[in-house]
Image (cartoon, rainbow, N blue to C red):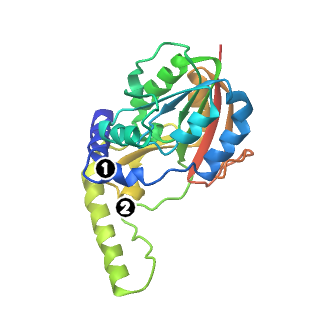
Amino acid sequence: MPATMDLLLKAHYRSPGVPESYAGSSELKPAEARILSRLRPELANASLLDIGVGAGRTAPGLRAAGRRYLGLDYSLPMLALCRIRLRDAPLIHCDAQELCLRSASFDAAFCWDALGDAGHAARMRMLREIHRVLRSGGWLIFRANNLDAPRRRPFAFPAAAGTGLRTRLSALGRYLRGIAHHLRTRRYESRGGGYEVAGDPYFDYALLSYYIQRDAQVRQLEDLGFSAVEVLGINGTPLAGGVCSDPFLFYIASRSD
């Protein structure tokens, strides 16, 4: 399953027009900006690793935050667009499951979305590799899909943005495409303790994403050698205990000695 999920995603990122669709965005999201602002004093003299840099949306903000920056991605088409946008940025083609970097060479690693594009085994390999390249006490900051958040299921009709005939026909087309995609990809879904790899409604179920409960994510990090895990909501503010329904959660963790 992980290899098939990986192949689906790699094919998506090299599909005509897809890399360009990501290149249109150039700003940090509010939660990302809030996290960077909060950590700015600690990051000022730090070496930062941007995993899954894509077309470069987050790169300018991260480059400005630290002393040294390196961006990487496993998609050559996405990386090519990033190189056009940021001609002087240090960027490399690399898969985060096997980082071509020295151990203990970075103070912080940012992985806004790439961990959601991996099956369970691949995700665990990525987290182990990130732990390896971080210095003792170094931070991992990433975003994860929240398994406890409500999301549309494949056979649920999508809400239409209006009542006109064209809008209804568009919603019907999306609904039928989603069912067709789900029937094709559902064989690759998997579930475990507190996580689920399943079709993503954002992509009309043509692609799979990794969803995980907050407590399961904290345990996962701690089992891999991270500590001081802090969980933040979709707006970038720390969360109290209990179940949260935000679609995305942000995590800040420190590499243990």
Does any portion of residue 65 appear in the rendered image?
Answer: yes
Q: Is residue 144 above or below residue 121?
A: below
Viewport quadrant of the N terminus: top left
Nearer-the-camera pick, 224 or 60: 60
**Amino acid type, label 2:** Pro
Q: Which residue is mark 2?
A: 154
Nearer-the-camera pick, 37 or 153: 37
Position of residue 9 measured from the top left corner of the image (x, y, whole percent)? 32, 43
Position of residue 115 measured from the top left corner of the image (x, y, whole percent)? 47, 37
Does any portion of residue 217 appear in the rendered image?
Answer: no
Q: Which residue is mark 1?
A: 186
Q: Are marks 1 and 2 in contact (CB under 8 Å)?
A: yes
Nearer-the-camera pick, 181 or 52: 52
The numbered disc on residue 54 is none
Q: How many marks?
A: 2
**Amino acid type, label 1:** Arg
Q: Secondary structure at mark 1?
A: helix
Q: Residue at image x 32%, y 68%?
A: 174
